[in-house]
Image (tube, helix red, strand yellow):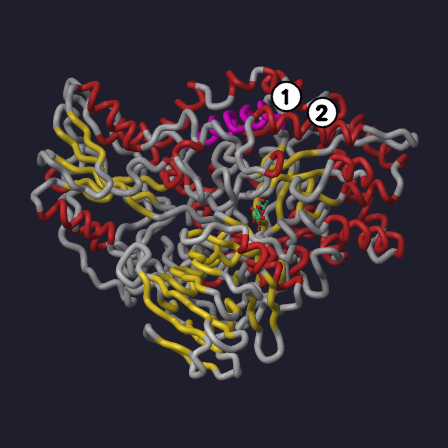
């Protein structure tokens, strides 16, 4: 194995080099024939633009923070809808609402009366598994599942359908495909990648790009049925140390090129028009400031002539920059910066920097030339209103159509990976009695994972997915049609003993930040699913485990507890695809066999990371490429059950759970006189009796704590962290502190919620009047955006108390959980009102 380029993992010794040798990178070039007429038109426009116009083109704002009037006034070149942004301030926009919004922005961009050119605005969105922000759309398996299909041609179909549904809702640009090559499954974005294998990513890249944009050299390329694609995140996003999101890829230049860069030359050759730069660093250098990789490698060596786009405020992480000011990113070669909420400040500062020459005019002209070129290639200058696109005019027939859903259902079938099938339990006979259990059985949100309607994919019910089918619904329909009996029982209880049980369980939705794990243990501290499998198995019911997940996780105990084990990944909206494969046909024959092969290596322990095919000493539980079919009569013996870690609760971002401080945190009470005590049991109280703590039941015995303030002045209950927490990036990403709590009585003085960052550093936000409007005696998730604390002066990079609640006499409240999150029943605003 020595000398193989696939070694990314443990061998990270030598001093990391940040020198780039462009001549050692693959050469690529735009596949489009030179178009002098187009370039002349671009030049002519450029010549008529003011400096202000040019700077406007180089900035992208989020629809939550920008109005059509802003776009008109600042001549902004593009807008995006981030994961939490939708039309009319909501998350559940219909096609009609999206079209109206797109029209409004488009119209505003064309309004102009001073004789300078009006340039149509581009509208980008994360359509990463279908048009996943649109209610009723066709949702494909997340990329990890597509990796399992080993079917590049399918990717082209998926791209095509996604483009059609985007166009049908008035949108002409997606931030996809993700060409990351995740090398450590602890990374919460591993599911956004197709595979740990760069070859597979390179094979898929041109297919998905072609599906989205149409084939270069044909009249379909970027026509009204297609959209602009974005290859992301350049470069090394999947190679960060310990799988940390936005972390540092500590790898050699050769690994960066051959592993992480593998998808880019093929995507460029297929005509991809945008490349998004990664949040992450390479050997300590933030990608958004890496001129050698962006300008010398991507633009020059690889001949990329489209738009280089920055990720969501990622420029703010470049040394010396803020979200509102970053000449360094433009000078490194980024053409357009995503400045969702910071666009106005960025506009002002960038304009000043262009005027002062800190950003050379040649750089500005290169950026704007690229932006105009892409807009012209897409035909935007004579496209007309987004709602007038032919697909948009018949959106009801296009979005979530039967033909589109059939492609997704096929993708589900092809993506299922069979790890175990002892005594040939599968396929099941649909004439029998089949119990369908587990909290994933009838749970379309769980099937879809993150980047689904909401950013993290949380806070959804089946009602949010009109036209979609749960896994249960698919099984039920096919069993019933065959004359058998299917019974849904989430907890696995039954009256009549079933012939077999299908237990559907797995990871709950997550996206960036929220999905990172300290190790690969499946739900440490929560054996609920394992108990369910074991119980049914113990009752003599043959058990099929169907695992919903964004990545391989250590779960040998669950595999042992089942007779058959299927990995379903995150299959999307067409749950019936599962029944197609798991059940025989009515006549007993097999319609669809298992086809999927592992796109990532499956670990033998929870600490076997990183684990990638080709690595020295490679010894996974199931290797890359593993996957049984019905012809394999392999019996799997009992797997070892040593995880390699203690299986207690180590969910990242959870500070207080089930009424207890999480590992690494303590609950501290501070009395009116300033004396602090760490409390580990309840009941308890401060020395002066001003604050009492008692145990309380929420869903289980004593899984919550009640705080009561009595005599004295103000007293504080806080969660202290044993080591400083760095929540900078979460703050930037609009994450909240979410308390699951119950208000019984409020102090007339009003409570504050706060954080501290060491001695005399911190922030407290008065929330009394906002709490007053909430119901009493009811459990609620109350969230406060982290940025409230930052804006009030806290240094979010070193919190020693990520949560403190200060109040006084008369207040009685209870908590069961305090954690980072993005969904709440009530989101507090930063300012008291
Ligand atoms: C993500 C990108 C995404 C962008 C816009 C970022 O935080 O890293 O993948 O395209 O947000 O939503
Ligand atoms: C994400 C966006 C998301 C936002 C939440 C960012 O970090 O990339 O897509 O919408 O946070 O406001």
263 or 486: nearer the viewer: 486
Is 12 rendered above or below residue 190?
below
What are the residue bounds of the magenta stretch? 150-170
Q: Splitting the image into 4 quarters, where does residue 326 fall? A: bottom right
Q: Position of residue 288 (x, y in %)?
A: 66, 55
Q: Where is residue 503 in the image (x, y as percent from the top left)?
A: 22, 41
Q: Does the image show residue 455? A: yes
Secondary structure of the residue carrying numbered label 1: loop
Tags 2 and 1 touching, CB below 8 Å:
yes
Is 79 rendered above or below residue 770?
above
Majority SS type along the magenta span: helix
- Name the image quarter holding the N terminus: bottom left
**Residue 738 placement, left or right of 831:** left
Q: Does the image show residue 608? A: no
Q: Position of residue 568 (x, y in %)?
A: 32, 39
Disc 2, ligand 1: is the CB inside 8 Å? Answer: no
162 or 396: nearer the viewer: 396
359 or 408: nearer the viewer: 408
**Residue 731 placement, left or right of 55:** left
Q: For mark 1, what is the residue?
A: 224
* Res. 379 mark: 2
Residue at image coords 51%, 78% = 712
Q: Does the magenta stretch include residue 743?
A: no
């Amino acid at each position: 194995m020595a000398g193989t380029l696939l070694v990314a993992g443990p061998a990270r010794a030598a001093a990391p080099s940040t020198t780039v040798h462009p001549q050692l990178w693959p050469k690529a070039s735009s596949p489009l024939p030179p178009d002098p007429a187009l370039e002349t038109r671009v030049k002519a426009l450029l010549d008529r633009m003011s400096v202000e116009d040019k700077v406007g083109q180089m900035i992208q704002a989020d629809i939550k923070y920008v109005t059509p009037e802003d776009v008109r006034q600042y001549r902004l070149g593009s807008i995006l809808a981030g994961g939490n942004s939708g039309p009319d301030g909501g998350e559940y926009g219909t096609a009609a609402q999206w079209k109206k919004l797109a029209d409004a922005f488009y119209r505003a961009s064309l309004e102009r009366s001073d004789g300078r050119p009006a340039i149509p605005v581009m509208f980008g969105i994360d359509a990463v598994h279908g048009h996943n922000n649109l209610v009723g759309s066709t949702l494909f398996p997340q990329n990890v599942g597509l990796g399992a299909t080993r079917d590049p041609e399918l990717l082209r179909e998926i791209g095509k359908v996604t483009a059609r549904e985007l166009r049908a809702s008035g949108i002409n640009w997606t931030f996809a495909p993700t060409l990351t090559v995740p090398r450590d499954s602890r990374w919460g974005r591993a599911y956004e990648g197709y595979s740990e294998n760069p070859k597979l990513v390179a094979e898929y890249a041109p297919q998905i790009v072609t599906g989205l944009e149409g084939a270069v050299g044909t009249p379909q390329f970027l026509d009204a049925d297609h959209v602009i694609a974005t290859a992301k995140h350049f470069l090394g996003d999947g190679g960060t140390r310990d799988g940390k999101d936005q972390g540092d890829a500590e790898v050699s230049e050769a690994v960066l090129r051959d592993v992480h860069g593998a998808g880019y030359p093929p995507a460029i050759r297929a005509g991809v028009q945008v490349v998004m730069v990664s949040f992450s660093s390479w050997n300590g250098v933030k990608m958004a400031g890496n001129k050698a990789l962006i300008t010398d490698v991507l633009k020059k060596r690889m001949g990329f002539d489209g738009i280089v786009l920055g990720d969501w405020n990622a420029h703010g992480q470049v040394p010396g920059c803020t979200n509102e000011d970053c000449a360094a990113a433009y000078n490194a070669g980024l053409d357009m910066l995503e400045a969702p909420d910071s666009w106005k400040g960025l506009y002002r500062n960038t304009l000043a920097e262009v005027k002062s020459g800190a950003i050379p005019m040649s750089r500005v002209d290169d950026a704007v030339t690229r932006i105009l070129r892409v807009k012209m290639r897409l035909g935007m200058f004579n496209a007309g209103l987004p709602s007038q696109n032919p697909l948009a005019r018949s959106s009801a027939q296009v979005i979530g159509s039967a033909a589109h859903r059939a492609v997704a259902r096929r993708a589900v079938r092809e993506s299922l990976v069979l790890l175990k099938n002892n005594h040939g339990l599968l396929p099941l006979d649909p004439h029998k009695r089949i119990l369908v259990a587990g909290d994933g059985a009838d749970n379309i949100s769980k099937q879809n994972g993150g980047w689904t309607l909401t950013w993290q994919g949380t806070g959804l019910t089946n009602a949010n997915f009109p036209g979609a089918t749960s896994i249960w619904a698919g099984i039920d329909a096919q069993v019933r049609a065959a004359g058998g009996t299917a019974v849904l029982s989430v907890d696995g209880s039954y009256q009549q003993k079933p012939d077999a049980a299908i237990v559907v369980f797995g990871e709950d939705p997550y996206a960036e930040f929220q999905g990172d794990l300290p190790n690969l243990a499946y739900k440490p501290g929560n054996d609920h699913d394992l108990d369910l499998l074991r119980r049914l198995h113990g009752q003599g019911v043959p058990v099929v485990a169907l695992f919903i997940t964004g990545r391989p996780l250590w779960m040998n105990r669950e595999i042992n507890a089942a007779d058959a084990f299927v990995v379903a990944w995150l299959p999307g909206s067409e749950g019936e695809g599962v029944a197609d494969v798991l059940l025989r046909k009515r006549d007993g024959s097999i319609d669809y066999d298992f086809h999927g092969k592992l796109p990532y290596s499956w670990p033998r322990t929870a600490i076997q990371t990183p684990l990638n095919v080709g690595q020295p000493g490679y010894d996974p539980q199931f290797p890359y490429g593993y996957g049984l079919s019905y012809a394999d009569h392999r019996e799997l013996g009992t797997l070892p059950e040593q995880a390699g870690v203690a299986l207690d609760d180590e969910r990242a971002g959870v500070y207080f759970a089930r009424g207890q401080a999480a590992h690494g945190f303590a609950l501290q009470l501070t009395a009116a006189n300033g004396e602090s005590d760490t409390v580990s049991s309840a009941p308890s109280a401060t020395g002066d009796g001003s604050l009492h703590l008692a145990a309380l039941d929420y869903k289980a015995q004593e899984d919550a704590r009640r705080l009561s303030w009595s005599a004295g002045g103000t007293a504080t209950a806080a969660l202290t962290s044993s080591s400083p927490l760095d929540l900078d990036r979460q703050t930037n990403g609009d994450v909240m502190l979410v308390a699951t709590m119950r208000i019984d009585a409020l102090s007339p003085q009003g409570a504050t919620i706060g954080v501290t960052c060491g001695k005399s550093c911190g922030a407290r936000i008065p929330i009394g009047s906002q709490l007053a409007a909430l119901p009493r005696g009811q459990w609620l998730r109350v969230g406060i955006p982290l940025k409230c604390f930052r804006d009030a002066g806290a240094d979010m990079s070193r919190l020693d108390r990520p949560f403190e609640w200060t109040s006084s006499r008369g207040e009685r409240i209870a908590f069961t959980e305090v954690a980072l999150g993005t969904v709440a029943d009530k989101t507090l605003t930063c300012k008291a009102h």
